[in-house]
């Protein structure tokens, strides 16, 4: 894969035929905003320090540095003893047990194994740490003052409005309705291609066959909603909010959404590529074509959210959704014909075999340009691995660059080399996430797991891009945007974890101005494996 990337570095991935062109700048805000339903899981912050073990007047307290040292040492101890592997095994066996019938062969043995693993993992240093700080007022304050959705929504809205993007790509949004009815936000932005429609969360029943987002109804429901929103059906965000909020009418799945500035942009096409699934759950890649009202330029915006996880098998899972010719991929779209929205098949009987082929389809369209924004859950330096669909090793970063012909804004803006290496070696950690779960997390195995990496990406065939390093909320407060640069995981990085009272998500927003040419014809160069 390194040889392929060096080839890409030596030759521009785009060949442009000469034609008259006009340049229009589009400001994009790309952001995984951390779903309300997924937000209350013990995310760690040290801004309320010193940190006490409990509310008892004689309780021992720790400075932020001392507390982080405790977390780090507990994580190292569990890793060295093999306890973290036992946590992983326990999680896998619990999932198997949940799906098994009590009468099934091997059920009792598996149940006994789960019980044994629970007993063993209860001796974990991370579990001891969790119990030690179970009643810490400062950690409880994180849940109340930082992770509470009402506070996070207000902060997200404030940052977005001050950034003033033309287009917004959200991941993990499970409050589409709230954004659409908010007076300040909806005055500028919408995700509804048909303004006569009103967005409503899906209806789930005890009979899953009647659910709005059951597998056989998923596509028709998201097309009929006329919303640029691709929900994950039967999502954990919906499940966790249902348990917390009961039967509140606004409970929704999380998913990807595209909002645009109503006064300057008009939607002309909305499409979805459904990700193959052998379960009841469905999700889709979202594609929207917008027309600039002043210049008549049209451009495509595509967004998605790849599977999470740092293990090699998770990178293989991500690669399988980028390119998997053996799976059954389906795509549908609606187009505006000056009077109404109608469903039309994709041109030339387009045959999609994964997300990158879908993006490539838009990138190759004449007289239009493309922006692909996503939470890839994969850093550019992720160790290359050989997927089933390829004869050579690759990773998500290399696959997207190679298969779509688009360029990364991180490269265009001189944050990274095309190989994914940092431009500034003294600060090798170029990041869009800086998060860690603490003792109050319900997932002990993830306590102390410091995720400091660049997993939010924007790719484009626009000519140039200009990043913003902050958003000014007022004359005194600047909110940082991606990427941030750090020397190491210890010290400054672990004392400035997100979410925080200033940053309402575990991801930093990406704010970038992208120059798009109105009449540029683009053809992909084909690179062979070296």
Image (tube, grey):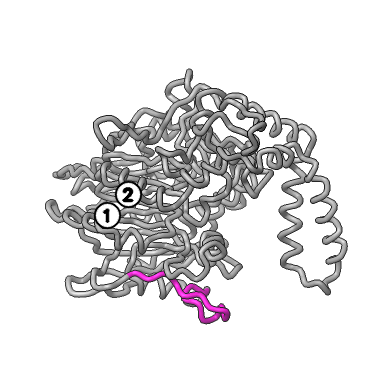
- Residue 328 is situated, as x and y percent measured from the top left of the image, at 53, 66
The kind of secondary structure element at disc 2 is: helix
Q: Residue at x 45, y 63 (%)?
A: 231
Q: Is residue 213 magenta?
A: yes
- Residue 486 is situated, as x and y percent measured from the top left of the image, at 48, 25
With 266 as the anchor, is 255 left or right in this view?
right
Q: Please tell me whether the stretch drawn in magenta is mainly helix, strand or loop.
A: loop
Q: Marks 1 and 2, Cα distance to the nearest angstrom?
A: 7 Å
Height in image: 488 above or below 501?
above
In this view, which residue lies farthest toward the top? 426
Q: Is residue 168 magenta?
A: no
What range of the chain is rendered magenta?
199-214
- Residue 207 is situated, as x and y percent measured from the top left of the image, at 57, 81
With 161 as the anchor, is 416 left or right in this view?
right
Quickly name the residue at label 1: 185
Quickly name the residue at label 2: 157
Classify the position of the N terminus by image quarter: top right
Residue 268's quadrant in the figure? bottom left
Residue 469's quadrant in the figure? top left
What crowding class fits label 1: few (fewer than 14 Cα within 10 Å), some (14-19), or many (20 or more)? some
Is label 1 in contact with label 2 (beta carbons under 8 Å)?
A: yes
């Amino acid at each position: 894969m390194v040889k392929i990337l060096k080839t890409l570095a030596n030759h521009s991935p785009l060949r442009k035929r000469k034609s008259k062109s006009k340049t229009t700048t589009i400001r994009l805000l790309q952001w995984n905003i951390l779903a309300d339903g997924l937000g209350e899981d013990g995310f760690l912050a040290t801004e309320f320090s010193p940190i006490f073990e409990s509310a008892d007047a004689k309780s021992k307290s720790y400075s932020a540095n001392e507390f982080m040292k405790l977390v780090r040492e507990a994580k190292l101890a569990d890793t060295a003893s093999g306890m973290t592997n036992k946590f992983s095994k326990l999680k896998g066996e619990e999932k198997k047990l949940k799906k098994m019938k009590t009468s099934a062969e091997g059920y009792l043995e598996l149940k006994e194994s789960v019980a044994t693993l629970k007993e063993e993992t209860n001796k974990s240093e991370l579990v001891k740490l969790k119990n030690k700080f179970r009643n810490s007022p400062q950690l409880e304050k994180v849940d109340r003052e930082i992770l509470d959705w009402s506070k996070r929504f207000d902060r997200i809205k404030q940052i977005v409005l001050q950034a003033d993007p033309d287009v917004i790509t959200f991941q993990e949004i499970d409050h589409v309705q709230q954004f659409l009815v908010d007076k300040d936000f909806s005055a500028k932005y919408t995700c509804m291609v048909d303004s006569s429609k009103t967005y409503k969360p899906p209806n789930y029943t005890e009979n899953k066959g009647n659910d709005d987002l059951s597998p056989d109804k998923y596509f028709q429901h998201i097309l009929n909603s006329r919303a640029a929103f691709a929900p994950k059906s039967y999502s954990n965000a919906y499940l966790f909010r249902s348990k917390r909020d009961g039967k509140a009418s606004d409970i929704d799945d999380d998913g990807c959404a595209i909002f645009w500035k109503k006064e300057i942009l008009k939607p002309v096409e909305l499409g979805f590529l459904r990700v193959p699934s052998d379960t009841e759950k469905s999700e889709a890649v979202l594609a929207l074509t917008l027309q600039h009202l002043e210049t008549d330029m049209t451009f495509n915006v595509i967004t998605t959210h790849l599977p999470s996880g740092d293990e090699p098998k998770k990178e293989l899972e991500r690669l399988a959704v980028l390119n998997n010719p053996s799976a059954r991929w389906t795509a549908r779209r609606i187009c505006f014909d000056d009077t109404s929205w109608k469903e039309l098949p994709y041109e030339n009987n387009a045959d999609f075999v994964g997300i990158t082929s879908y993006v490539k389809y838009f990138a190759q369209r004449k007289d239009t340009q493309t922006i692909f924004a996503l939470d890839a859950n994969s850093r550019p330096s992720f160790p290359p691995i050989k997927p089933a669909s390829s004869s050579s090793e690759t990773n998500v970063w290399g696959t997207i660059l190679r298969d779509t012909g688009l360029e990364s804004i991180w490269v265009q803006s001189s944050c990274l080399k095309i190989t994914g290496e940092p431009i500034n070696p003294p600060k090798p950690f170029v990041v869009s996430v800086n998060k860690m779960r603490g003792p109050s997390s319900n997932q002990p195995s993830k306590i102390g797991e410091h995720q400091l990496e660049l997993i939010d990406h924007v790719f484009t065939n626009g000519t140039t891009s200009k990043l913003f390093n902050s958003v000014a909320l007022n004359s005194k407060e600047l909110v940082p945007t991606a990427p941030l640069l750090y020397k190491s995981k210890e010290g400054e990085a672990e004392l400035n974890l997100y979410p925080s009272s200033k940053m309402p998500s575990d991801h930093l927003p990406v704010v970038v101005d992208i120059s798009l040419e109105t009449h540029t014809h683009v053809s992909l160069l084909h690179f062979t494996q070296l």
